[in-house]
């Protein structure tokens, strides 16, 4: 009985997510005239790929894709490396102020990202990084949630294993690279995937720091396609489908790593 109830709830949640997804795809395959005449019908007017060809030929979607891919990939690399090193130091190294730093990291989990927009903008403007990829990559490199995920996983590594490596003459760099990191692949995969998705979907911060059309990311570029005077529904939906398809692909390919990482690190 309980299993059937869980399966029913999961099916309902899947349908709630699937209905707008199917609606967006169906709308992107119709013409604007058919959408205006029969807005609630998914099949009226027939289907075609005209909206996708129009969106790709008339907007720099390829450049937006490349920008989002480069920014997301760099964010993943810097986040995994720097946050894992910070968590490793907080768990295994003994130094003054460690508890205070951990408390600040924990407090950062409760701070909304919108509250950091103004100070970050002033900071990156003073560093002359506005309009560059680094203004979008560096904020993710010090994400408190990523440090917390690695910290939770490193705490599960047996301390005698680390001490044995140290007795054998391994430096802390070698312990980190050859002992700790290979054992925390689920956590690294979880942080990498969530960072990629968050960076790809980011809207407010890229909108503020990127001022050139071809330098924009997918979410910011898609927002510029919506005109209050003349909304081209099919083209907007086609561009939106092109924007979220990579995220669907990432989730489908790495869903096992996501579940394993969440189960191992205890994220809620």
Image (cartoon, rainbow, N blue to C red):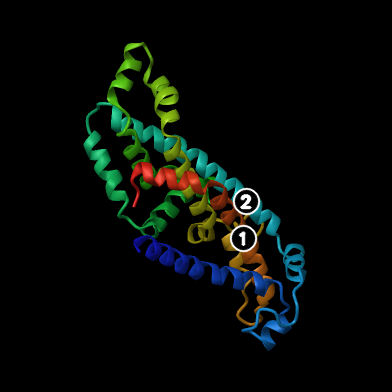
Question: Residue sitting at 68 percent across and 82 percent down?
Answer: 35
Q: Secondary structure at mark 2?
A: helix
Is 163 situated left or right of 201 in this image?
A: left
**Residue tagged 2:** 67
**Left or right for 186, reference 225:** left
- State the quadrant of the N terminus: bottom left
Tell me how far mark 2 sits from mark 1, CA to CA: 12 Å
* Spot occupied by residue 218 in the image (x, y as percentages of width and height): 60, 59
Q: Which residue is drawn at the image coordinates 48% and 57% (left, top)?
A: 205
Numbered circle sitting on residue 243: 1
Q: Residue 127: tell me if it is visible.
A: no
The mark lying in front, picked from 2 and 1, is: 1
Q: Which mark is residue 26?
A: none
Across the whole image, how many numbered discs are drawn on residues?
2
The location of residue 57, given as percent across then percent down, is 77, 63
Residue 191, image x and y in percent? 45, 44
Which of these two is toward me, 68 or 210? 68
Residue 110: x and y in percent read: 30, 54
Of 4 and 135, which appears nearest the observer?
4
Q: Earlier in the sequence, mark 2 or mark 1?
A: 2
Q: Is residue 252 above or below residue 156?
A: below
SS of the residue under disc 1: helix
Does 237 sit above or below residue 198? below
Q: Residue at x 66, y 81 (%)?
A: 230
Q: Residues within 10 Å of mark 1 (few under 14, many from 20)?
A: many
Q: Name the residue at 43% across, 49% down.
A: 123
């Amino acid at each position: 009985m309980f299993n059937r109830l869980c399966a029913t709830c999961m099916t309902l949640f899947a349908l709630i997510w699937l209905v707008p997804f199917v609606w967006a795809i169906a709308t992107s395959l119709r013409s604007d005239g058919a959408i205006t005449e029969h807005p609630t019908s998914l099949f009226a007017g027939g289907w075609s790929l005209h909206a996708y060809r129009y969106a790709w030929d008339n907007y720099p979607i390829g450049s937006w894709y490349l920008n989002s891919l480069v920014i997301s990939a760099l964010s993943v690399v810097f986040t995994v490396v720097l946050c894992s090193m910070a968590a490793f130091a907080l768990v295994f190294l003994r130094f003054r102020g460690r508890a205070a730093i951990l408390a600040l990291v924990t407090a950062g989990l409760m701070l909304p990202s919108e509250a950091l927009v103004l100070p970050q903008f002033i900071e990156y403007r003073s560093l002359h990084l506005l309009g560059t990829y680094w203004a979008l990559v560096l904020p993710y490199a010090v994400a408190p949630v990523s440090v917390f995920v690695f910290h939770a996983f490193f705490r599960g590594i047996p301390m005698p294993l680390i001490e044995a490596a140290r007795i054998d003459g391994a430096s802390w760099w070698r312990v980190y690279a050859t002992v700790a990191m290979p054992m925390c692949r689920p956590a690294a995969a979880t942080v990498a995937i969530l960072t990629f998705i968050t960076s790809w979907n980011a809207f407010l911060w890229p909108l503020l720091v990127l001022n050139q059309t071809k330098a924009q990311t997918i979410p910011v570029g898609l927002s510029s396609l919506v005109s209050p005077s003349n909304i081209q529904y099919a083209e907007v939906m086609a561009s939106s489908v092109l924007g979220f398809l990579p995220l669907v692909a990432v989730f489908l390919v790495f869903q096992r790593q996501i579940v394993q990482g969440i189960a191992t690190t205890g994220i809620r």
